[in-house]
Image (cartoon, rainbow, N blue to C red):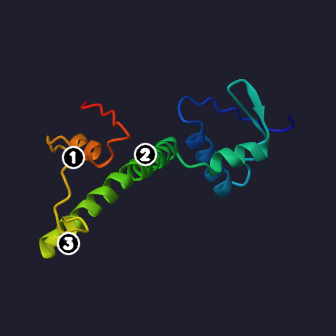
């Protein structure tokens, strides 16, 4: 190193230090940054300039947290979409049934049996086709 030389030892945020030195060097032309060492590795002037152009640690952590939150929000939305669609479908069917009760009836005009109906439906099936036995599991 030729001429006057200064060495700065910095504790804390390397980005803030690099920004401070860069800004001071802009205002004071005799100061020329020739290099640096970060975590035991030598840095060129271009690498120091790149570090100085970075945003502060807090801003970068905030951006990372925002990106993670956005990803989680999108995942929740995608997982919730089928449930929402099913709820809208049931709501639309209910509204249509309230307007036109025949919506819930079969083609013969009789109500469609409910899923939890306890009547024995195997008797009518076995009577209709006596040659074909029907095995039904009541569970």
Residue ID for mark 1:
115
Residue depicted at x 38% and y 55%: 81
In the image, is residue 92 above or below residue 49?
A: below
Observer-nearest residue: 88 or 4?
88
* First of labels 1, 2 by sequence position: 2
Observer-nearest residue: 2 or 39?
39
Q: Classify mark 3: residues with Cα within 10 Å, few (<14), some (14-19) or many (20+).
A: some
Q: Position of residue 24 (x, y in %)?
A: 62, 50
* First of labels 3, 2 by sequence position: 2
Q: Distance from label 3 to label 2 (Cα)? A: 36 Å
In the image, is residue 111 above or below residue 51?
A: below
Residue ID for mark 2:
72
The mark found on residue 42 in the picture is none
Which type of secondary structure does the marked residue at label 3 adopt? helix
Q: Position of residue 66 (x, y in %)?
A: 44, 49
Query: Furthest residue to the top?
Result: 40
Residue depicted at x 67% and y 51%: 25
Q: In which quadrant is the C terminus drawn?
A: top left
Left or right of 42, for residue 71: left
Residue depicted at x 31% and y 56%: 86
Q: In which quadrant is the N terminus drawn?
A: top right
Observer-nearest residue: 130 or 1?
130
Q: Distance from label 1 to label 2 (Cα)? A: 37 Å
Q: Number of marks in the image?
A: 3
Q: Classify mark 1: residues with Cα within 10 Å, few (<14), some (14-19) or many (20+).
A: few
Q: Distance from label 3 to label 1 (Cα)? A: 20 Å
Residue ID for mark 3:
96
Q: Of circles 3 and 2, which is in front?
A: 3
Q: Are marks 3 and 2 in contact (CB under 8 Å)?
A: no
Q: Are marks 1 and 2 in contact (CB under 8 Å)?
A: no
In the image, is residue 119 above or below residue 96?
A: above
């Amino acid at each position: 190193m030729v001429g006057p030389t200064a060495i700065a030892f910095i504790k804390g945020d390397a980005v803030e230090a690099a920004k401070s030195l860069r800004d001071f060097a802009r205002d004071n032309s005799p100061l020329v940054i020739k290099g640096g060492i970060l975590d035991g590795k030598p840095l060129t002037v271009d690498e120091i300039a790149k570090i100085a152009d970075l945003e502060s640690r807090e801003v970068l952590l905030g951006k990372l947290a925002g990106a993670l939150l956005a990803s989680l929000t999108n995942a929740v939305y995608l997982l919730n979409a089928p449930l929402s669609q099913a709820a809208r479908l049931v709501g639309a069917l209910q509204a249509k049934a309230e307007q036109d009760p025949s919506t819930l009836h079969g083609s013969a005009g009789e109500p469609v049996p409910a899923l939890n109906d306890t009547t024995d439906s195997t008797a009518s099936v076995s009577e209709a086709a006596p040659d074909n036995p029907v095995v039904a599991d009541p569970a």
